[in-house]
Image (cartoon, rainbow, N blue to C red):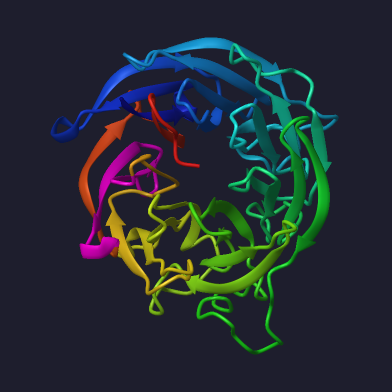
Amino acid sequence: MQLVCVGLTGEDRIDVYEQRGEEGLVLCGEAACPGVVFLTADPGGRRLFAATGPSAELHAYAIEPRTGALSPLGAIPNAEAHEPNDWQPGGQRPDAANFIATDRSGKWLLSAHYSAASASVHAINPEGTIAPTPTSRVQTARGCHCIRTSLDNRWAFATCIAAGTWPSEPRGGNRVFMFAFDAETGVLTPTGELAPATPPPGEVISGLLNRFGNRNDRGPRHIALHPTLPRLYTTDEQACSVTAYAIGDDGSLTELHSADTQPQDFPTGPPSRGAPSELAVHPSGRCLFAANRHIPDPLPGVPQTVACFPLDAEGNLGALSQLTTEHVPEALSMSPDGGTVYALGTEDGSQGGQLTECRVVLGEGGDFERLEAVRTMAVGRGDNPNPKPLAVLETSGAPRL
């Protein structure tokens, strides 16, 4: 059974949909989750985990494999010694996790803390509950947005964006942190950090890097890994690009190249306009998708899009194409079989929730041809569902990491 889990921040709830082919998505379960900001599932599709903003908690749910129903397993505080400050939207606590993911074994839950400038690891107990005391908590830089482990589960990588989103927010780290990950103990050990390359003043190394007055800050935001090659990809929030990195045998990263997620005629303006958020790599390793969104002030007549890139045999990014969506594509996730990309977000200029189901079309030999929209549906029940997180999983298989 393929399930699509939608976090409704404005309605303090997680809705679960079953994918029924031509019938589309059918609501099959729900669970309360106050202020949910991110969702992830374990590799076997048995547990769903949620991070909340105002309460700074980590929640665990059991997934009934035949029906998709969610059963709460409990929550733990994920707190540090911080007080809320002025710039945070929606009352989100500085110590809240804004991103979570399991390691490749499903025994550990990793979290990224944007304001607290840190990353943590908690054990997942056999019954699916989350251990209250972290096995590891490491400092990064402000703006820590994502953390994921490598395919072999020996390394972990955490991204920190560059410029602040809100006027009074301090600048972020604009770098990727590297860690050795001990899958037996859940301990992260820092091994280095990498700041994306910037050109000399007045020069451009990728078409959009100088368009938004960002002094060539990349702002690496979210991470996806190639399914077979030692390659890591980031969306770059300030640069409006995707960057490819090679992962060395020692867990080090080497920057390879970047590609713009918006066309050259995209209007210039603040980096929040056109900025990419989440991304996913196809399980075949033949294409990559990134959600573009221009917020908080959508540009009239300029579409919201999903950026699409073919990948060659070495994992290099090919030519950009785009799929236009009817809403701001804030979250993006792929079905485990690679047949469908889901884009979740709000309508332009409002908090109304929309979810778009997109079909991945591959040609002969598995080369990427196009991404096409199948249907768009409303999510939430009221006027302010404010959907943020999205998780797609197969109850008999593995969710896309």
Q: Is residue 54 above or below residue 292?
A: above
- Horizontally, residue 92 falls left or right of residue 290, namely right
Quadrant location, the N terminus? top left
Q: Residue furthest bottom?
A: 202
Give residue 311's quadrant in the image: bottom left
Number of marks in the image?
0
Q: Is residue 363 magenta?
A: yes
Residue 250 in percent (x, y) is at 75, 58
Tell which of 5 and 350 is nearer to you. 5
Q: Is residue 132 magenta?
A: no
Residue at x 47%, y 20% (from the top left corner) = 46
Residue 124 in percent (x, y) is at 65, 21
Tell which of 121 and 385 is nearer to you. 121
Residue 343 in percent (x, y) is at 36, 45
Residue at x 44%, y 33% (from the top left corner) = 398
- Give the extent of the magenta segment: 338-366
Q: Residue furthest left?
A: 22
Residue 23 in percent (x, y) is at 15, 30
- Horizontally, residue 234 falls left or right of residue 362, namely right
Q: Is residue 134 above or below residue 265?
A: above
Residue at x 50%, y 31% (from the top left corner) = 43
Q: Is residue 331 above or below residue 39?
A: below
